[in-house]
Image (cartoon, helix red, strand yellow):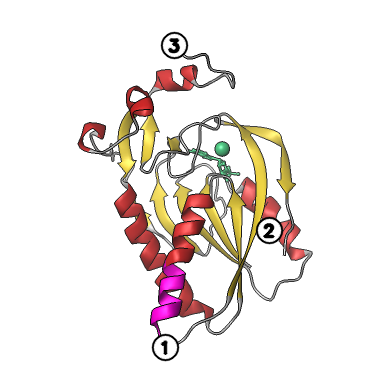
């Protein structure tokens, strides 16, 4: 069973002033939780593990938007590097779906899947596994030969057994995180590091139409 790099519940991350943060987000972030470089290094290893297991199967890489786009692009870059430097290589095609199930940081009842489904799966984060289960049941209708799910983050939620993907980047405590394409109400996707928000940032970005102070 996949485990991923374990980040303990008591881990508080890093002082944000020791990293480069966009000026417009400086006052909104509490700590840097996973620095961008560490994300990329872990992703490089996931790419190697995936390619080792894939054999000679043609891969349809399916990106779950929007939160999965950075991880998807970086993972594919590493897979491409392996393809062009190793003695074996497999063709890869890409596809994209969009699933919307959260409003700000609260799950909504209705889950909508937008896009063509056609299968390696690149996912940003799995909290309860609700989103992923819905997508997988849709994918089944297309009768793929095999489906593997890759998730950069999985949250440790003790109250539910949850869903476990085939490949996991990091297993993190049940904290709300942003950055590296993960958003809070569409903000913070333009931040390289995975970070923890300040409570008052949630208030500040609550409304879609944010007035410039
Ligand atoms: P699940 O359905 O509970 O597994 O939630 C998965 C989806 O919720 C992800 O694709 C994200 O869009 C969103 N999500 C869950 N936790 C976070 C978080 O900490 N930050 C940003 N988005 C999150
Ligand atoms: Mg979101």
Q: Which of marks 2 and 3 is nearer the N terminus?
A: 2
Is residue 83 on the magenta stretch? yes
Q: Which of the two marks, 2 or 3, is nearer to us in this view?
A: 3
> In the image, what residue occupies the spot 52% across and 41% down?
159
Crowding at dot 2, Cα within 10 Å, few <14 / some 14-19 / many 20+, comes out as some
Crowding at dot 1, Cα within 10 Å, few <14 / some 14-19 / many 20+, comes out as few
Rendering quarter of residue 22: top left
Q: Earlier in the sequence, mark 3 or mark 1?
A: 1
> In the image, what residue occupies the spot 47% across and 50% down?
154
Position above or below: 3 against 199: below
Crowding at dot 3, Cα within 10 Å, few <14 / some 14-19 / many 20+, comes out as few
Res. 185 mark = none
Residue at the far right: name it: 141
> In the image, what residue occupies the spot 62% across and 52% down?
132
Residue at the far top: name it: 213
Decide which of 112, 115 is in the foreground and name it. 115
Residue identifier under label 2: 136
Q: Earlier in the sequence, mark 2 or mark 1?
A: 1
Residue identifier under label 3: 213
Residue identifier under label 1: 87
Q: Where in the figure is residue 76, as x and y percent of width and height?
A: 48, 65
Q: Which of the two marks, 2 or 1, is nearer to us in this view?
A: 1
Residue at the far left: name it: 18
């Amino acid at each position: 069973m996949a485990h991923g790099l374990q980040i303990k519940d008591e881990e508080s991350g890093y002082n944000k002033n020791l990293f480069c943060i966009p000026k417009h987000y400086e006052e909104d972030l509490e700590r840097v939780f996973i620095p961008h470089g560490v994300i990329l290094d872990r992703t490089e290893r996931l790419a190697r593990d995936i390619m080792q297991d894939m054999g000679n199967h043609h891969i349809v890489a399916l990106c779950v938007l929007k939160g999965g786009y950075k991880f998807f692009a970086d993972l594919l870059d590493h897979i491409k590097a392996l393809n062009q430097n190793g003695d074996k290589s497999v063709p890869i095609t890409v596809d994209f779906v969009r699933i919307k199930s959260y409003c700000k940081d609260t799950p909504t009842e209705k889950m909508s899947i937008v896009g063509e489904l056609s299968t390696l799966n690149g996912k940003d984060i799995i909290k309860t596994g609700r989103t992923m289960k819905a997508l997988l049941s849709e994918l089944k209708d297309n009768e793929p030969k095999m489906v593997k799910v890759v998730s950069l983050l999985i949250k440790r939620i003790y109250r539910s057994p949850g869903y476990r993907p085939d490949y996991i980047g990091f297993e993190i405590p049940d904290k709300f995180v942003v950055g590296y394409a993960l958003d809070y109400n569409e903000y913070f996707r333009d931040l390289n590091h995975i970070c923890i928000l300040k409570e008052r940032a949630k208030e500040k970005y609550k409304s879609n139409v944010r007035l410039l102070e």
